[in-house]
Amino acid sequence: MAEANPDIAGLTALVQQLLAERELDRRERDQVALELERARQAAGPVPSVIQPTLPKIGGISNGVVWVGGEPNVSWTETKNLEPRSAYCRRHTTDKDLKVLEYMLKPHVPKFKRDDPLFPLVSFASDVETHMELTGMDSVFWFADPTDSTQMLNVFTSHSRFPENYVAQEVSRKVKNGIYDKYDIQNLEFSANYLRESLDVTLRGDIRGLLRAKITGPELFMTVVSEIQSSSVRSYRAKERQLESMSLKTYPGENVKTLTRDIANICDELDRAGRLPEDIILTIVNIYAKSSVEEFRIYFIGRRVEVERFLKKSSGKSQDVVRAMDDYIGYKEMGLEANSQYQSLIDSGNYGPAATANDTGDAPHAYMTKTETDALIQQKLKPSTRDTSTIKCFKCGKMGHFANKCPDNAGPSGVPAPTGAPNWKKVAPAATDEQTKTVEEVKYYWCDHPNCKRWNPSHLTDSHGRRDTDGNLLQEEANAAVDVATETPSGNLGAW
């Protein structure tokens, strides 16, 4: 042959042309056929395009399988229309190793028992995100035990599943072929990830509870069971813990730390469907007992709005309540408290934070008579405090409190005597407003014989007395506030 190794199609055409143009003898035809066969063998088998198996919960994109997403009840498809991330793909090349490495890389920090900075709620949220990004989340979804038309995942609804429910469902789906090969793989990989994300002590504590080939969902439920009890008694204890919380037990009355602890308890109760309807009122009352007057007054005012909201939302479903324009939830209230706290910190008006210790300024509206007397005596003592770092809120200069400001001085340059009339005791004229705002705090005039002063809580017709819990009489509360005012009032937060 003149040409070496022609392609099969071309060689076939050439042979057909030669046979048509001239008649060849038998030997020549045999030789041509032999050359054609040799060319076919040299070319090798024609490759065929093989599509990977379509997963039940996932899809195929550009010839590559991807998995993950919330499954439907019949376990035939996912709600995801595309992979959540590149790590949801299941390659058949060396890329598989990179995906697998990321899938199994344990969480940092590792989860351990009784870590206030990384509670179970936070761990569950992080694990859920990792499972979604790697396409392993589908196997953590199960039918609602009380409504088979709905799906729940164990990360946010673990308290809704009866004991052993998840293990029984996993076993049933494996046995009946409901899970495909990708699901089986995800059950194994997710267990490896979870196991390596646990603190060595916690792993040791639950080792006796684990089967040799436990799956990811079963392992997660085991961790939940070990960390917390889902009993009614446990949740009631959480509710009592929340109701007894107080800012004064936190160093520097740190609002952000308190808010974090409140959120952790509320998250746990919310996931279990045990969050009290009036939880917001409980939280507002906690903030309203701060010893920082401006912070306390703000939340006393918010309490009225919260009570109004609770009346409007009473008897309505959670979906309806959350859709209300003036919706207030525990997370929103926490953000609001943190914002107020940070604002006071930035302006230097949050005294307890200056020393990160209890300042001794008890909440005036909640003190007993003994506590009030003690506060009055304390405030009447001459102060020996170093004021070199104190900024006057009147003139803006350093080294003195506002009530000692030279701008208050008379002609001789001597500060006005401390015995000057207290503005809180100067009554408004009959034609004047009975309310006014001083330094962004609203004050009301009370003309009750035992009061007769401007105060931040009530008018004359709402003058109150000691309640059944022994809380302070309003006139005594005002007296305590006045004593504090007659000491460095403009910088009360620093005391």
Image: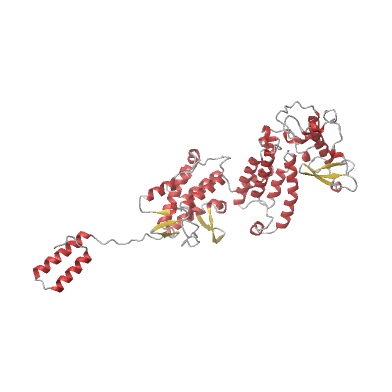
Left or right of 43: which side holds 249? right
- Single out the residue that lies furthest toward the top: 384
Q: Is residue 35 above or below residue 200?
A: below
The percent coordinates of residue 328 (x first, y second) are 68, 52
Q: How many marks?
A: 0
- Single out the residue that lies furthest toward the front: 411
Q: Is residue 54 above or below residue 288?
A: below
Judging depth in this view, the residue of 423 and 315 nearest the camera is 423
Judging depth in this view, the residue of 145 and 262 nearest the camera is 262
The percent coordinates of residue 198 (x first, y second) are 49, 42
Where does the C terminus fall, quadrant-wise? top right
| Residue at the image position 51 percent from the left and 54 percent from the top | 165
Left or right of 213: which side holds 5? left
Check the image and tell me how it is coloured: secondary structure
Where does the N terminus fall, quadrant-wise? bottom left
Q: Is residue 329 visible?
A: yes
| Residue at the image position 68 percent from the left and 33 percent from the top | 354
Give the image quarter of residue 449. Answer: top right
The percent coordinates of residue 411 (x first, y second) are 85, 30
Q: Is residue 395 above or below residue 334?
A: above
The percent coordinates of residue 15 (x first, y second) are 17, 69
| Residue at the image position 63 percent from the left and 58 percent from the top | 319
Give the image quarter of residue 265. Answer: top right
Judging depth in this view, the residue of 358 and 407 nearest the camera is 407
Q: Is residue 210 visible?
A: no
| Residue at the image position 66 percent from the left and 38 percent from the top | 254
